[in-house]
Each structure stands twice: as structure tokens, then as C-alpha cells.
Amino acid sequence: MTSVLFEYPKSSAFGRIVPKSKIYEHVSPSKALKELFVGQVDQIVWQYKLAPETINLRQTPSVPEIEIFTIILKDGELKHDVLRSIDQAIPFPLLFELLYGDKCKVIAAYKRPSEADAAKWVVSDYFESAWLPIETLRTPLPVVLNLEALYEQLLAPLMPYPARQGERLQQQVERMSMIRFKQRELEKCEGRLRKEKQFNRKVEINAELRELKRVLQCVLS
């Protein structure tokens, strides 16, 4: 996995602090979610707005703008529930830069308009970079024709496995989710095998394990 911090143009700087209360207004948070915000988030900053008027790239129906949020953490941890609530509150694709001490991590879900209801957004699992030193040299934005292509390029370094030949972003994201699902199934199966005492059941679980590994390899390749 390639970890990249991008350098966003000064023309796209927004720099607006977002009070947690503003997020609450849009998502009706549970008590547990509020506790996560209070316990894990020090400050939320709407750092950049990548839009036709700020970076001179054409919008598309699925990507009218891209917002870059900086979240300063209190203890280096952040549950995805917090990110998902912000994604639900902001009706545009988002990328988050998490800051803790002298390190930075990029994390984002693939976000697209719902096919059933264009007013709603579908948010995938989250993909993230490694923690990087905050002074890491940033990479200029890629040269692309529109915001949708830019969004794909911003998300690409966060994917744990490379795209297949001709694979579009949505297809790649769906495959990444399938890989995670199969990996969890594999871990559960290995756990059952370790606990099983009966020889016949061990044979059955081993066969199941081989099939899961075969399927996972097909999804990976």
C-alpha cells in the first residue's frame, strides 16, 4: 500500500472549524456516539474545498465537490462511527486527515449518490494509509480532467490491493469489501479449527478452510 499526503492548492483553502454540535444537528447522534466525539476528537477543521471555482476542474454528477477535513485527535484513536457521522452530515465526497502528535494518517470511504435516491449517499467501508510523519513531503495533485477522476486518484493510494486491469473504482471498492469479508470468515474458521477436538469435525473444517482460501485467492488476484 502506497501512503501519500497530497498538497492541496492554496486557492482551495477553506480553513473553517466545524463545531461538533453542527454534526449532531444532521445525524441525531446516540449518547455513545457523542461520547466518542468528546473522548476522541479535539477539533474538526474543514480544511480544503476542491470545487470547479477553487481548482478549475469540471464537476460531475457523482462528484460535484471534494472536501478535505482535518481531525485533531486526543489519544490517537478514532472509531469509524465518528467518520461515518461526518460523512452523513456533509453531502459531498470527503477525505479525512487525522492528526495526532507529529503524525498524520489519511482515511476515507468511497462515497457516491444512491441509485435509488439521488438525495442520499452510499458510504463504503473505510480505507486508510499508515501513520506518516507530519513533515512528510506532500505530492502535487494529479493532472486530471474532472473532479471524479481526481477523487479516484485521491482514493487509489488508500486501497490495500491494486486495481485489476480495467477495474473501475466502484468495482475495486466492492472487491476490497469482499476481501475483508472473506478474510473475516477465514479467521473465524481458523478459530473453530483450533478449538475443535473431534477428528471428523477437524477434517470438515479443514476442507472448509481450503475452500475459503481458494475463494479468497480468486478475489485477490
Image: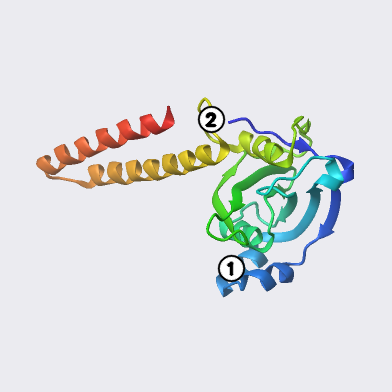
Q: Nearer the viewer, residue 112 or 77?
A: 112
The residue lying furthest to the top in this view is 165
Q: Nearer the viewer, residue 167 or 160?
A: 167
Decide if residue 159 is on the left or right side of residue 96: left
Q: Secondary structure at mark 1?
A: helix
What whole-number distance in Å separates the C-alpha atoms at marks 2 and 1? 34 Å
Seen at 75% across and 36% down, the residue is: 6
The quadrant of the rendering that contains the N terminus is: top right
| Residue 26 falls in image quadrant | bottom right
Hey, what amino acid is under mark 1?
A: Leu
Residue 33's mark? 1
Camera-near label (2 vs 1) is 2
Hey, what amino acid is under mark 2?
A: Ala
Residue 9's mark? none
N-term-proximal mark, 2 vs 1: 1
Residue 163's mark? 2
